[in-house]
Image: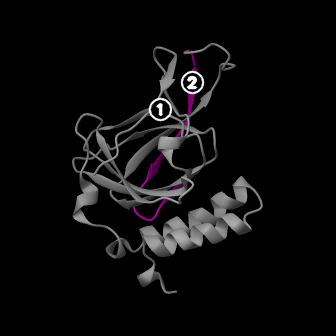
Amino acid sequence: MTVETHAIEDLAADLRRARQDARDERDMLRRVRELALRTAAVPGSWVEDGLYEADDEQGFGVHLLHEEPDHSLTIMAVSWLPHRGAPPHDHGTWAVLAGVDGTERNDLYERTDDGKTEGHATLRKVVEKKVGVGEVLCMAEGSIHGVANDSDRTTLSLHIYGRNLQYVRRSKFDPENHTVTPFTVKLEG
């Protein structure tokens, strides 16, 4: 298969093979990273204008491109409105995101409390990583990150998850108030 024909259906088939062959989560992330890079490199084979639509209230748009029948191996396009983003959150699964159009800033955190007090969490920012066109960020299950589009235009990124985010328990964090609450997002379309 050539890169030029690597559309979302091809990516899904490659993800299924990767899941069969991966030894563990780390190996899966390595494999998915390469697949995400390849797919993001040819946006003309799958990007449509509608993927740039975003929910003004939440500041971003989540577009489901593919999902396995058991809600695993989910592929989404996420559009980020200018000067908007998402608060620190986890995914409830591993995640790989690739820059397609524009740059998104990812602030990565570690949780510093023991997680035993419901509704309470303390975070420490570990690193900031900008993900632009042709760049990828891999996050193991349990990773926490916040996202921001610091630019003046809507950006787009490709997201691949081990499970559909609507079927896992996710949390969002407020680092200033030291709180943690459930996190759900609206899907476009």
Residue pointed to by mark 2: 123
How far from the left and from the top, in percent, is residue 110? 61, 31
Residue located at (49% from left, 27% from top): 182
From the viewer's perspective, tell me whether residue 177 is left or right of residue 60: right
- Provide the residue span drawn in magenta: 120-137
User: In which quarter of the view is residue 120 placed?
Assistant: top right
Query: Is residue 24 located in the magenta-colored stretch of the structure?
Result: no
Q: Is residue 117 above or below residue 6?
A: above
From the viewer's perspective, tell me whether residue 183 is left or right of residue 118: left
Given the image, on which type of amino acid does mark 1 rest?
A: Pro
User: In which quarter of the view is residue 150 placed?
Assistant: top left
Query: Is residue 134 located in the magenta-colored stretch of the structure?
Result: yes
Q: How would you rate the neighbour count of disc 2 (Cα within 10 Å): few for under 14, some for 14-19, many for 20 or more? A: some
Q: Is residue 178 above or below residue 152?
A: above
Mark closer to the chain start, 1 or 2? 1
Residue located at (49% from left, 75% from top): 10
The label shown at residue 34 is none
How far from the left and from the top, in percent, is residue 137? 53, 53
Q: Is residue 146 above or below residue 75?
A: above
Helix, strand or loop at label 1? It is strand
Callouts 1 and 2 close, C-beta under 8 Å: yes
Among all residues in the image, which is located at the extreme right? 23
How far from the left and from the top, in percent, is residue 93? 60, 45
From the viewer's perspective, tell me whether residue 31 is left or right of residue 188: right
Q: Is residue 43 above or below residue 125?
A: below
Residue pointed to by mark 1: 88
Among all residues in the image, which is located at the extreme front? 69
Helix, strand or loop at label 2? It is strand
How far from the left and from the top, in percent, is residue 95? 55, 50
Given the image, on which type of amino acid does mark 2 rest?
A: Leu
Residue located at (68% from left, 16% from top): 116
